[in-house]
Amino acid sequence: MIKFLQLILILLLFTACNKKIEYTEAEESAYALIKRIMPERNSEFTFKEITVTKDKDIFEISTENGLVSIKGNNAVAMASGLDWYLSKYCNSQVSLNYNQISLPEKLPEVLKPIRIETPFNYRYFFNYCTYGYTMPWWDWERWEQMIDYMALKGINMPLATIGQEAVWQEVFRDMGLSEEKINDFFVGPAHLPWGWMGNIDGMGGPLPDNWIKQRKELQIKVLERMRALGMKPVLQAFTGHVPESFKELYPEANIFQIEDWAGVKGTYFLDPTDKLFQEIGTAFIKKQTEMYGTDHLYDADCFIEVNPPSEDPEFLKQVSKSVYSSMAQADPEATWVLQGWFFFFKKDFWTKERGNAFLNGIPKDKVIVLDLYGEKNPTWNKTDAFYGQPWVWNVICNEDQKVNMSGDLNAMQNQFQDAFKSEIGNNLQGIGVIPEGLGYNPIIQDFIFEKAWSQEEVVITDWVSSYASNRYNTKNEYAIKAWDFLEKSVYGRTRTLWSPLITTPRLMIFEEGSQEDIRHVRKDFKITEEDPFAWDLDVYKLHNAANNLLAASEELKAKDTYNFDVTNVYRELLFSLTHKVINDVSVSYQSKNIKEFKDASVTLLKLLDDLEAIAGTNENFLLGKWIEDARSWGATTAEQDYYEWNARTIVTIWQPYPEGGLRDYAGKQWNGLFSGYYKPRWQLFINYLKQSLETNTPFNPKEFDEEVRALDYKWTKSTDVYPATETGDVISVAKRLQKEYEHFFKK
């Protein structure tokens, strides 16, 4: 009998030990995430989904039974708790490009349980342009990394526009549009955001059917993962933008052509008050929901950088009412997510009367307005907080994926505090980052998204010091000092300026009276003895940052985050010389000093070579990688060549014809571009100036422009191969540059 009871007891214990633990979907998603980012230490953490009484995300962190316990009301909240623990307890950092997770042998105990609740319903991420300037060629593996990053930073409202072509293809077919006309409407892969925003038609098209199929499959994966983690992706709604051929297909419809955009012929829009608008808008959302499901959030930007056809407030109210109605007919739970950029970009048109009429044509609380430029030009405080509708405070920071180091942390904090203290009790419902491009200022995203969970004003220098320590898992004094100098230089400016080095070469003398437009020409930038660089930061402090960062190389050279930063900082340092060297070329030419002109020309061309060298030391600065990723989408050589052409075009001449007006708008500081694209232009320019000096004849800018435009256009059609992996050791290259350029930075 005793043996029988012992046997029963053993069986019961065996059953208990082998009973499968049941996890909720949110818990399973959290466990899967930690296994991806910490495969060797994930068993030391537990996750538990909890319910909350208020409609706000929350996480709790404690130590239970020797394990780190993280609880939250969804997977994003739990992931945010994990990120908080890694940052605050483990001197680690999850970042955009690389993670630095160096856990101690024994995980630190949370002596007093932590409970943090966010006041924000929405934490928004992405810009339409990000899908063209940064992410057009990303595959599932790269998206998987990004979605994990977003969850860890607490993002729950990402814009998700991949695969939209498949929806429109079916909608247009159902409406009787021919394949030829559909092809004429779709733009090239990297140009798609501007097609969906209604700026362009057909540019860089037609799209291969294989592209449409592959992107549909990718979008399904992306949305499935986002939703599993508790995110609510923002999908597209109909803006009124239609193919020109609709005028023939529907002659009774009120279709009008809008004003030109960036020198491109105006596209065609259907009057939102026209009954056909409701038909198309409803059909689109129904078809999109069939393909991708819905979280009831829809972006539609009818007038992002152009004015409506009428100034009448009543018309504007009818427009917004009709646009929302087209969403609600297909989805009664629809909420319109609206970029508020036009209130700033076209502020002369959008008076308070017109803006109020437009926003209040939408039912109360059925719209979320995104205030894009919160760090410098906020719109909430000029529109009575968007006339009572819910809104999200964002920073844009990066335009056209500039490869730079910029973002004024103090300005961001001050502007955020103003908005938060004024509006959190009213209709401010979120915080976000809405950059046109990503990848070169991870500190900005980390700084802003921390505000989602902690809104207290921080001492910027202390915060940056902790950031640096986490970034490298070190207290190295040189590394900490380097970031102190970075905070006082590049991270003390709101955004950087376009550089004449990566625009069409021009004579440029930095002196009193210079003018500036938004892109290329400088104003109030003067070469002086005190400031020989004429830049928008203290270059001497940037130089100190570079020297200190390199001084930490012996300890930190094995860390990916460190090597990325060395590439980025030394690239930025060399680039800060561009105004000076171009000024030297220009002044020596104007004074007809042939010797000084030759010396200045040699310096300029060497600078381009050295920028090529430092950019080649990290995969994030490689034109070859960009092209390789683009070509990877092609099923045939013809498709691969097409994608490469599109990839080359968007980062150079932008509009795929010689006379395009957005040339160099998205110019990148990349290995491959310095040697293959920028240097030949400057060499041609120098040759023109040299001939002018030697023959004592005037420089002919018109002739030069014609030749350089032909050169640029030819390059976009070429298939020259550039390195797709790193060339050169970053520490060795940086030490050489440190030595060779030291004399420029001696006061």
Image (tube, rainbow, N blue to C red):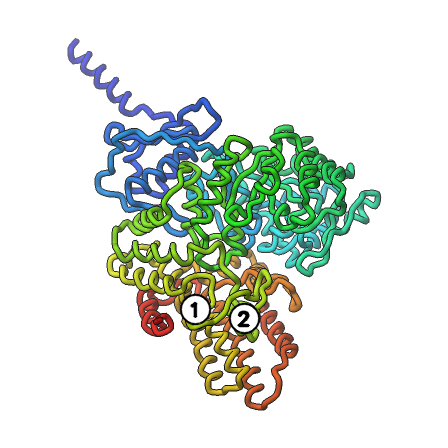
Quadrant where the C terminus is found in the figure: bottom left
Q: Residues within 10 Å of mark 2 (few under 14, many from 20)?
A: few
What label sits on residue 512 in the rendered view? 2
- Position in image of residue 720 (x %, y %): 51, 70
| Residue 478 visible in rendering | yes
- Position in image of residue 498 (x %, y %): 53, 63
Q: How many marks?
A: 2
Residue at 56% over, 46% down = 162
SS of the residue under disc 1: loop
Give the residue type at disc 1.
Asp
Give the residue type at disc 2.
Glu
Q: Nearer the viewer, residue 172 or 234?
A: 234
Is 644 placed above or below 529 here? Answer: above
The quadrant holding residue 521 is bottom right
Please give the residue where the numbered disc 1 appears in the rendered image.
531
Residue at 39% over, 33% down = 78
Is 529 placed above or below 475 here? Answer: below
Q: Nearer the viewer, residue 699 or 53?
A: 699
**Residue 240 shown left or right of residue 440 in the figure:** right
